[in-house]
Amino acid sequence: MRPKIDNILPKFGNTRSDRIIRFQSRLLKELSLSLNTEKNYRNQVKNILAEAGKVIDLFFLYAFSEGANGKREIEIFWVREPSDVTRNAVSLMLEQSIEGDRVHCKICICNSTVDTSTSLPELTARDIALHARMIQTDIPMENVGTGMGLATKRRRLTHDDAVIENILTAFSNIITSVITLSAYRREVERFATRDPLTNLYNQVSFWDLLEYETSRSQRQEYKFSLLVIDLDNFKAINDTYGHDTGDSFLRDFSVILKSSVRSGDIVARYAGDQFSAILPVCDESQAFVVAQRVIENLRKHAHRTANGVSVKVTASVGVAVYPDHAKASKDLFLLADNMVAQSKTYGKDRLSMPSEQDDVEVLRNMGEKNIMILEALSQKRIVPYFQPIMNLGNELIEAVEVLTRIVLPDRVITAAEFIETVECMGAIGKLDYQLFEHALAKVRDCKYAGNLFINLSPRALVLGEFMPTIRKTMRDYGFEPSRLIFEITERDTVKNLKLIENFISELKQEGFRFAIDDFGSGYSSFQYIKTFRIDFLKVDGEFIRGMVNAASTEKQIVMSIAALAGHLGIKTIAEFVETENIMSEVRGAGINYAQGYYIAKPSPDLS
């Protein structure tokens, strides 16, 4: 025969009010929550349940939730051990109570018991009265709530309703904190491994996965491939349409990338607009197909801005295969990354693979410098140094040349040590932008009123976003075009003569001025001054240094350059003026301006 419910519920005598007061006091202590709550909350709930069972006719507490994926969970905390019949009856009762119309949704139920030494009788729905409460949280759940199962035949006393509400309040606070902290923990874990914008793996995870795949491929003796993907001219989107549009495009590309690779391939956002994909069990021919599919799918994609403008971007892809091209993960990445630079050099919107001539050792040495440069760019350690340019007529400093430096904790690196590597990496535009902005910030902060000479890489001329970015930066800092003189190195510009002619002509109309740097060092000196509307000639320093020798050929060349420039209305500047003797010779040759250590060394200070 089933025992009566009244026989197994606790009996309370005249001391019940005292027990309730003690219970309320202990209840307050249970509300002290911390990050340990997520691990220990079941013990806290059991403590509440054990105490509550002494002052109220209570069978169980329960919590239910429904995640964004539609999965529902119910956790039941029993005051005493239920029979299988009771457990099943209560589970069905709660499912029907919580689900409502959506009866086909699968529910996961877990149980725990406070006191396993004693048992509850077999209970049915008629024996239990549910008392539930919904919980309001910031976590995107459709349903979150708590409740309790009370005896339907419980004796209703004065304090019962207050005790029930206080139990549910304490229980709800714990469950709410657990849900919130659990969601926070999941987000922390996700951000530790995932890129928050695209939800692809981040750079840290990429390296872990690449190391793992390298080790696994070595053990199991199979090939795998690595793709490094860089979006072409992506900065133009941010500059033209804003970063929100740029971020939206990156999200679009992450979807394109995932749909272009094979099931089981690993994709990551490496940095900025650079992505990567690890292709397990994949040789060179298979990698070619995947890489080509990425490029073609992106070509088909047109991103629609908020204003309805259609934006298209291409990608340059580098491919490397383990162990054919490299046997270490870092070397493999170095090769693939170098292939990206090669793709950009050959015109972008294409893929490149290592050839037999690509030497890993050489590239590794280059790679160390590449890493240093990339870190300098990302940490904004590109610092402008300023070298004064003196007017020899009035001996006033009328301009400064902006020189590029990378400042490390232990030393300062000059442009001669890294500029060629930057150009090969395809990062010259980024370096020029950063240098230019830092220089104008210094000009503004120091209230400098003179002119700026700044070197312009010929490769920057083919970047469609270069001048729009320069113009915007100048507007932001209130710097007039007439105060900016672009220096173009003669030996580097001969390949793009017609392009530069059009470029200079357009910018001259806006007020910009131009100088030919290292004039006389190449073979196109006269062609340059004939073709371009140049404002300054900077005479090559080797000629200037050689002027101190008696009856030197260099002196005659410098005097001829000065005379010709004077007839054409072009000002001349002597570089490498390092001694008093050189300064005297430069004055005598009719040069207009001088620059060099004798006047002042380059400095980060601008006065």
Image (cartoon, grey):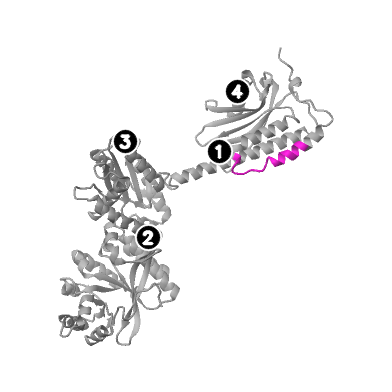
Q: Earlier in the sequence, mark 2 or mark 3?
A: 3
Residue 135 % position (x, y) = 63, 38
Characterize the local packing of mark 2: few (<14), some (14-19) or many (20 or more) Cα atoms within 10 angstroms. some
Range covered by the magenta-colored residues? 22-37
Nearer the observer: mark 1 or 3; the answer is: 3
- Residue 92's label in the rendered image is 4
Q: Name the residue under label 2.
A: 376
- Numbered circle sitting on residue 219: 3
Are dots 1 and 4 in contact, CB under 8 Å?
no
- The residue furthest top is 1
State the mark number for residue 141.
Answer: 1
Residue 222, which numbered label? Answer: none
**Residue 527 located left or right of residue 128:** left
Q: Earlier in the sequence, mark 1 or mark 2?
A: 1
- Residue that lies at the very extreme toward the right in this rendered image: 14
Mark 4 and mark 3 lie on one chain; the one further toward the N terminus is 4
